[in-house]
Image (tube, rainbow, N blue to C red):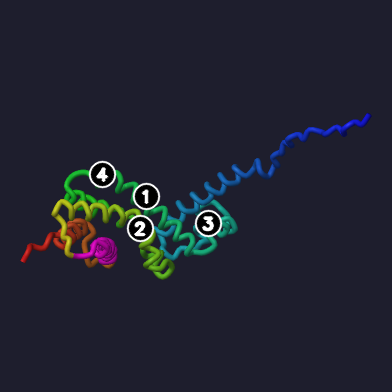
Amino acid sequence: MTYAPTMSTPQNKVRRTTGSERDEPRRRADAERSIAAIIAAAIDCFRQDPNVSLTAVAKAAGVSRVTLYAHFPSREALLDAVLEDSVQQADTALQAQRLDEGPADEAFSRLVRSGWNILERHAFLLLASEGVIAPARRRTHHKKVLARVERILVRGQEEGVFRTDLPLAWLVTTFYSLLHAAAAEADARHLKTKSVPDILDRTLSSILRPVPNS
């Protein structure tokens, strides 16, 4: 009699988690805390001195230079992260203004004044990033904020309170450029800081006013 060979049933192998893998979430959390501490310290340091050294930033953050450079290998990389964090804060503040509610021209006025207040608090970053972050790159950081500007402009055009004879992108650029020009003028003491919101509001309102049919 011939007997068929007995086939062993394959068993699922249980993969054991290594110590390194178990430590990964903790290492990630530590890295995130270090990054947050560095960015917060960098904001304070750049506010006091736009030319502050990265060594001083590391000391203020309570981390080593090695740790700082591991996350931000250059001054440009750190400023990039600081700008991104600041613009995110600005977008959150603008969200609280309920810019999608009420007449578009009134919402735009709130946007201008809130936008200036936010920019004034972070004007030191313009100095710190000068010559380090390219202007085009700086503007890229403002994409979310400028998207809010564009939505209000479109709504105003639909309501008939904003002009439609100029390209929308140009009107957004005008808003962005005038706010930053006002910051430079205030820093040079060519404008009184307390008068800037009114000046910006009046200037932009006159620019956006519909052109009467000839």
* Label at residue 89: 1
Q: Which image quarter holds the C terminus?
A: bottom left
Marks 4/1: CA distance? Answer: 15 Å
Q: Which residue is mark 2?
A: 142
Disc 4: CA contacts within 10 A as few (<14), some (14-19) or many (>=20): few
Marks 4/3: CA distance? Answer: 38 Å
- Name the image quarter holding residue 153: bottom left
Furthest-right residue in view?
Answer: 1
Which label sits in the foreground, 1 or 3? 1
Disc 2: CA contacts within 10 A as few (<14), some (14-19) or many (>=20): some
Q: Which residue is mark 3?
A: 58
Disc 1: CA contacts within 10 A as few (<14), some (14-19) or many (>=20): few
Q: Is residue 2 above or below residue 150?
A: above
Nearer to the camera, 48 or 31: 31
* Residue kind at label 2, given as amino acid type: His
* Residue kind at label 3, given as amino acid type: Ala
Helix, strand or loop status at disc 1: helix
Q: Is residue 114 one of those drawn in magenta?
A: no
Q: Are marks 2 and 1 in contact (CB under 8 Å)?
A: no
| Mark with earlier residue (1, 3) | 3
Marks 4/2: CA distance? Answer: 19 Å
| Mark with earlier residue (4, 3) | 3
| Mark with earlier residue (4, 1) | 1
Marks 2/1: CA distance? Answer: 11 Å
Q: Which image quarter holds the N terminus?
A: top right
Q: Which residue is mark 4?
A: 98
Marks 3/2: CA distance? Answer: 27 Å
- Please state the extent of the stretch shown in magenta in the rendering: 166-186
Which label sits in the foreground, 2 or 1? 2
Nearer to the camera, 128 or 105: 105
